[in-house]
Image (tube, rainbow, N blue to C red):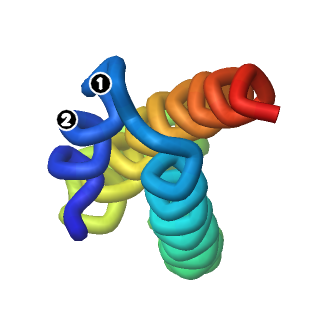
């Protein structure tokens, strides 16, 4: 299931405990996958930053990185991770109310 589908499903107010646990598990897995992908991209960023041309500042190189496909993907993944973390916390709160 895609993250956007999970977010839509979780918004439903009348979910059973089993449904909430299933969505929590799926979202946790997606969150872990996002973090692993971010780690790979951050390694690519480190290598990109290391290949500065003479006279190129670190900030100019950082701006250049953000314009690459990897830099753009990292920006998106970071925001998705923040949203997913918030949704996971919400799911946990809703689950605890069932216990």
Give the image quarter of residue 76. top left
Which of the 4 image quadrants contains residue 23? bottom left
Above or below for 80 versus 98: below
* Label drawn at residue 11: 1
- Tell me whether circle 1 and circle 2 mark residues in contact (CB < 8 Å): yes
Considering only vertical position in the picture, is 96 above or below 27? above
Residue position marked by numbered label 2 in the rendering: 8
Q: Position of residue 94 (x, y in %)?
A: 63, 25
Q: Secondary structure at mark 2?
A: helix
Q: Secondary structure at mark 1?
A: helix
Q: Residues within 10 Å of mark 2 (few under 14, many from 20)?
A: few
At x 46% / y 30%, what residue is drawn? 83
Q: CA distance from mark 1 to mark 2?
A: 5 Å
Residue 61: x, y in percent? 45, 49
Q: Does residue 63 appear left or right of residue 56 in this picture?
A: left
Q: Within the image, what quadrant is residue 14 found in?
A: top left
Q: Position of residue 30 (x, y in %)?
A: 47, 66
Question: Residue 67: which disc?
Answer: none
* Position above or below: 98 against 6: above
Front in this rendered view, residue 71 or 25: 25
Q: Quadrant of the N terminus?
A: bottom left
- Name the residue at 21% across, 62% down: 2
């Amino acid at each position: 299931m895609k993250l956007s589908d999970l977010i839509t499903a979780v918004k439903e107010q009348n979910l059973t405990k089993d449904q909430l646990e299933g969505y929590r598990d799926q979202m946790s897995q997606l969150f872990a996958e996002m973090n692993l992908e971010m780690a790979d991209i951050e390694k690519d960023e480190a290598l990109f930053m290391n290949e500065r041309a003479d006279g190129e500042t670190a900030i100019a190189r950082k701006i250049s990185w953000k314009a690459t496909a990897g830099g753009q993907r990292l920006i998106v993944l970071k925001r998705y991770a923040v949203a997913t973390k918030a949704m996971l916390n919400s799911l946990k709160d809703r689950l605890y109310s069932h216990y």
